[in-house]
Amino acid sequence: MPRQTCRSAILCVFVMLYLYSPAFAQGCSDAGFCTMGAMKPDQPFNKKIELRLRSMEISFYRASTTLTPIVYVATADLNFSLNQKTSFQVKLPYQAVSGRLGNTSGMGDISLCFTRNILKHEKFDVNLSVGGKIPTNHSDKRSDENDPLPMYYQTSLGSYDFITGISLISKKWLFATGIQHPFNKNGNEFVGDWNDEDRLAYVHKYPLAKDLRRGTDVMVRIERNFRFSRLNFSAGLLPIYRINHDEITLKDGSRVKPDGTTGLAMSAIATAGYSFNVRSGIKLLAGRKITQRDYNPDGLTRHFVTTISYYYRF
């Protein structure tokens, strides 16, 4: 089979897998840090070929939540080499949400991350990342009837977050851990009220989220990689533990810490990739939720996700 025909066939397979997979989730159901720097899945590792630190990756996903909102996101993931050991990552997502309560769209939270190789060995590398997330709005989008929308419909989490993590990567394994800490509450106004009484019972299915301040998350990624000349696959687990309660404001103005907002959310993650050449390739990610927290004011309740992306290194 000619090389160009082979590439086209593989691209078609990836696209069809993406389109026909049941997409019920956003990313890895976290607040953003599991796709940043040292915490990213399916990281390249090749001691025979010097990898280029500068890269551009464009990804697309369609996600359904546990209720009616459907989330569409296109993300530009840009990496710039500062020197042979240090790189800087910028993630620019554009998000649109469509559901029974309304439609929203806009820029998602901007992610910034510095990653440095702190140990290079013949058989493994250790990388350290430090970064953060910048909100693009206050999580205060409203419906066409001017009702405050729950976090499921928001394009931003509305908080400034600090993120750091470390990873050990070899030809067969990736181990990573990280932490994400929000510094402030957002400006969400959803307290369960709605002008349309016919939809009030449905509205009450959404967790209250007024002035939400999320708890701190800690993640661990355990991933087994299978690398070939052009193809690569991986399978792993992604547990994320929220170590302290979310905080919200009730109608009467009191601040509360709802039960069920701490604890474990864990997903199984699998990836497949094909390299067209040393510089470019395509990747598919699928993740299924194994367990999740009981109460999620932040709207990050997910079951299954598929993401397709194209990358180019230069």
Image (cartoon, rainbow, N blue to C red):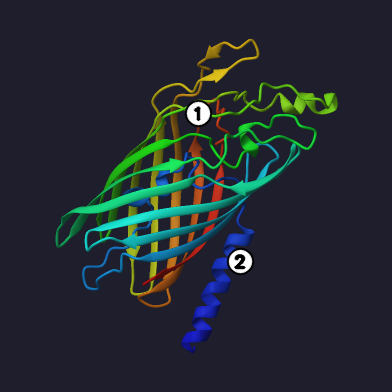
The reply to whether discs 2 and 1 touch (Cβ–Cβ < 8 Å) is no
Q: Please give left or right for residue 51 compared with residue 269 in the image.
A: left
Q: Determine the residue positioned at 44% across, 50% down.
A: 269
- Residue 26: % across, % down: 55, 46
Q: How far apart are marks 2 and 1 (CA)?
A: 32 Å
Residue designated by label 1: 293
Quadrant of residue 56 within the rendered picture? bottom left
The amino acid type, in three-letter code, at marker 1 is Arg
Direction bottom: furthest residue:
2
- Residue 75: % across, % down: 52, 56
Secondary structure beneath dot 2 equals helix
Q: Determine the residue positioned at 54% across, 79% down.
A: 8
Secondary structure beneath dot 1 equals loop
User: Quick one: 75 or 299, which is closer to the camera?
Assistant: 75
Vertical position of residue 233 compared to residue 29: above or below: below
Vertical position of residue 220 compared to residue 8: above or below: above
- Residue 77: % across, % down: 45, 58
The amino acid type, in three-letter code, at marker 2 is Met
Query: How many numbered marks are there?
Result: 2
Vertical position of residue 14 compared to residue 32: above or below: below
Numbered mark located on residue 191 in the image: none
Q: Determine the residue positioned at 31% across, 64% down.
A: 53
How many residues crowd around disc 2 within 10 Å: few (fewer than 14), some, or many (20 or more)?
Answer: few
User: Quick one: 188 or 194, which is closer to the camera?
Assistant: 188
In primary-sequence order, the first of circles 2 and 1 is 2
Residue designated by label 2: 16
Q: Determine the residue positioned at 26% across, 67% down.
A: 46
Vertical position of residue 73 compared to residue 68: above or below: below
How many residues crowd around disc 1 within 10 Å: few (fewer than 14), some, or many (20 or more)?
Answer: some
